[in-house]
Image (cartoon, helix red, strand yellow):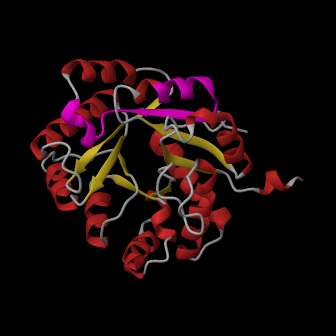
């Protein structure tokens, strides 16, 4: 049996593959991912410009799937015509989620009430098409909890690159959401120990792993461009935090990702 055969199978649940740092060398990026044990990747859309591009990648490469939507920080420039484009893309084959959507109080690109309105559009589209939502939340955990609680129904989706407290995590889990962890759990900052505690306590059937590439490159590669292959680095750190083997961590996170996004296990990178 070859070394590649022994590599745990992983799913990178969040990667911006259309980014100029990754897209021009996409075949090399995907080859490195495959050799690192990554079998499937969710390519994330954030605008009406990049959502068609990530769908085109998903249509061209087995193992890639697309999420389409308008990021809260892009919503100020979005129009009703843009939303019509997203709704048309959302019904296409290989689109497995709606988003990236959500709320953001860190940046001031989009008025907060407008963010809420666009978030509601995404939530309703996901409900209508029975697709999960990929949720962005930065410095707005309490706002998001209140917003989702007002729906009075479970929400199928994932809190991408989760950074909240355990109290926040419990609230989102109770609503039906999964939690995904990115390279921040590997950073050496002591002030991230609270996040690592959340990663340790998240139920085994509700946890996933991602790169958010080309961002959030895990230690010890910080300063370099992140890419899906490095989900293996984050997964190894997550396994250490949870006190289990990388093989066991990969098995449970991959099963969770395939359940949430309904990924066919036989459509893989390699």
Rendered location of residue 167, percent (x, y)? 26, 71
Residue at x-position 60% and y-position 33%: 24
Left or right: residue 139 versus residue 226 is: left
Q: Above or below — where is 208 with respect to 128?
A: below
Left or right: residue 172 versus residue 211 is: left
Q: Above or below — where is 4 with respect to 52?
A: below
Q: Above or below — where is 3 with respect to 115?
A: below
In the picture, the quarter occupied by the C terminus is top right
Left or right: residue 243 versus residue 194 is: right
Rendered location of residue 200, percent (x, y)? 46, 73
Residue at x-position 22% and y-position 49%: 103
Q: Residue furthest left?
A: 113
Q: Is residue 65 magenta?
A: yes
Q: Above or below — where is 90 with respect to 9?
A: above
Rendered location of residue 197, percent (x, y)? 41, 76
Rendered location of residue 220, percent (x, y)? 60, 69
Question: Which quadrant of the figure has residue 72?
Answer: top left
Q: How many marks?
A: 0
Q: Residue furthest right?
A: 1
| Nearest the eye: 97 or 258 | 97
Question: Which quadrant of the figure has residue 263?
Answer: top right
Residue at x-position 51% and y-position 51%: 256
Residue at x-position 81% and y-position 51%: 5
Q: Is residue 136 magenta?
A: no
Magenta residue span: 53-77
């Amino acid at each position: 049996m070859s070394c590649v055969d022994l590599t745990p199978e992983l799913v990178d649940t969040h990667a911006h593959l259309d980014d100029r740092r990754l897209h021009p060398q996409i075949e090399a990026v995907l080859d490195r991912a495959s050799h690192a044990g990554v079998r499937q990747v969710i390519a994330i859309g954030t605008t009406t410009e990049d959502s068609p591009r990530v769908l085109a990648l998903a249509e061209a490469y087995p193992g890639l799937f697309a999420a389409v939507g308008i990021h809260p920080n892009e919503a100020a420039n979005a129009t009703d015509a843009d939303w019509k484009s997203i709704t048309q893309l959302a019904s296409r084959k290989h689109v497995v989620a709606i988003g990236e959507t959500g709320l953001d109080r860190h940046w001031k690109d989009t008025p907060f009430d407008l963010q809420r309105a666009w978030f509601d559009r995404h939530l309703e589209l996901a409900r209508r098409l029975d697709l999960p939502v990929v949720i962005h939340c930065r410095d707005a955990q309490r706002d998001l909890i209140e917003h989702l609680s007002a729906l009075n129904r479970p929400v199928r989706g994932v809190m991408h690159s989760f950074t909240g407290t355990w109290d926040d995590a419990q609230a989102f889990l109770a609503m039906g959401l999964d939690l995904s962890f990115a390279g921040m759990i590997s950073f050496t900052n002591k002030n991230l120990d609270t996040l690592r505690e959340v990663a340790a306590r998240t139920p085994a059937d509700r946890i996933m792993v991602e790169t958010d590439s080309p961002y959030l490159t895990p230690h010890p590669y910080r300063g370099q461009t992140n890419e899906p292959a490095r989900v293996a680095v984050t997964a190894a750190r997550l396994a250490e935090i949870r006190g289990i083997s990388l093989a066991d961590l990969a098995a449970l996170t991959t099963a969770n990702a395939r359940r949430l996004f309904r990924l066919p296990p036989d459509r893989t990178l390699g």
